[in-house]
Amino acid sequence: MNYFDDQNVNLEALKKKAFNLRWAEVEEGVIPLTAADPDYPIAPEIREAMRDYIDDGYFSYSPQLGLPEFREAFSKAVKERKGEEIDPSCVLPLDSAARAMAVIAQAFLKPGDEMIVFDPCDFLFREACLSAGGTPVSLSVPLDPGNRKMDLSHFEEVITEKTKMIGLCNPHNPYGLTYTKEELDCIMTICEKHDLLILNDEIWSDIIYPDSEFNSIYTLGNERCGRVLSVFGFSKSFGLAGLRIGCAYCTDPSKFDEIVRASAVLSTQGGAASISQVAAAAAMEKAYYWVDLFREHIMKNRDFTVDYINQNIPQLHAYRPMATYLLYVDISKLNMVSADFVEYLKKEVKLAIVPGGHRFFGDQSEGHVRICIATSHAILEEGLKRLREGVEKLQK
């Protein structure tokens, strides 16, 4: 069965359920290539596991530290998929990767502490720091278009005596880049020198294209990774955004205890819903085949989109991502503020995409937009035709 045929996108359902800048929030007729959320229904094994769980009619309290099957499935999955050695006792299910980031920041940052946040990068690092009363410090990481690398040479320049943590988005959103072992070693060495913690977000680590390679920071060895505090979520790989399920994990039991304390799971104020944990456990145990098929589909979308933009819209330039199903597109030749361009497209050609700029990715992303390609080829092709039409109308 081909789960990713064009006809498998259920627009009727999406227009009722897909929020966060997507189908349920845009005007009729608008194509939203916006938030990172697939347009396809989830793997059947996940749905079956959820049905089995609710069949007896009980929704009782789950263990404070999460269902054992979730914690064990996660430990096994990251070992098999990424070579990470994470003990199940140091895995804490929480209600999304975003929540896990905030919990980690609140566990280890005090008001006034500084956290280095790459710019551009996903805004949730900044928000996690702010939720703890910390001060986000921007580190500009421009992209070298020649070698497709981020410039990390100014890292140490922004470290002060107040710096306690850095944010590591690996793979990187919005660039769609993976880090080399040498880059990770450089980051780790600086953090060791200045005794900095690392908030490590690997939510995109399942979406790696065959022409690229993913290196987790844990490839440096667990003996160096006691300072690494990681998060993962199940929205990007498995399409479970609405179930609000993710986790925090680490290798240091004492730091894990601090994460537990900050999460409020021991008082039942925090934690992840039992059915969401069941769904995620089933995803890890039975549905990675679906992720791999999905990746094959979006690789075709990736190549089609990059080639279409670069060959047909000379005013724009799309970078070919190594990971994620997000394209980072340079619109600087338009001499137009990103947010204004996005509003123009929505109004004139009924296409919604995400603007660069401070709100979503940081100041250095101005002059760029982000396009999500986790949809059908037919929808994507129509969206790109509208993008081309919009740019052409703008030039007249």
Image (cartoon, helix red, strand yellow):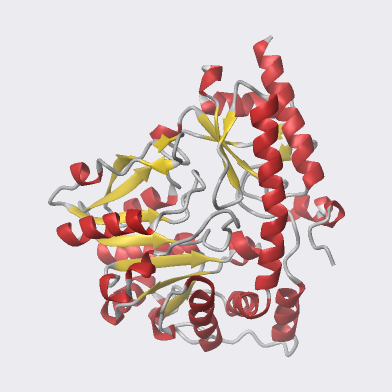
Q: Nearer the viewer, residue 256 or 1?
A: 1
Question: At x 47% / y 55%, what residue is drawn?
Answer: 171
Question: At x 44% / y 62%, what residue is drawn?
Answer: 215
Question: At x 46% / y 50%, what residue is drawn?
Answer: 172
Query: Residue lying farthest right?
Result: 7
Residue 144 relative to residue 38: left or right: left
Q: Nearer the viewer, residue 174 or 254?
A: 174
Query: Residue lying farthest left?
Result: 161
* Quadrant of the rendering where the N terminus is positioned: bottom right
- The answer to whether residue 27 shows anywhere in this view is no
Question: At x 46% / y 30%, what residue is drawn?
Answer: 366
Query: Residue 116 appears at what percent x and percent y?
Result: 28, 49
Query: Residue 338 appears at what percent x and percent y?
Result: 53, 27
Query: Residue 200 appears at what percent x and percent y?
Result: 38, 61
* Quadrant of the rendered image containing residue 290: bottom right
**Up/down of 366 relative to 150, above or below:** above
* Quadrant of the rendered image containing residue 253: bottom left
* Quadrant of the rendering where the C terminus is positioned: top right
Query: Residue lying farthest top?
Result: 396
Query: Residue 119 appears at what percent x and percent y?
Result: 37, 41
Residue 148 relative to residue 257: left or right: right
Query: Residue lying farthest bottom?
Result: 56
Q: How many marks?
A: 0
- The answer to whether residue 226 shows anywhere in this view is yes
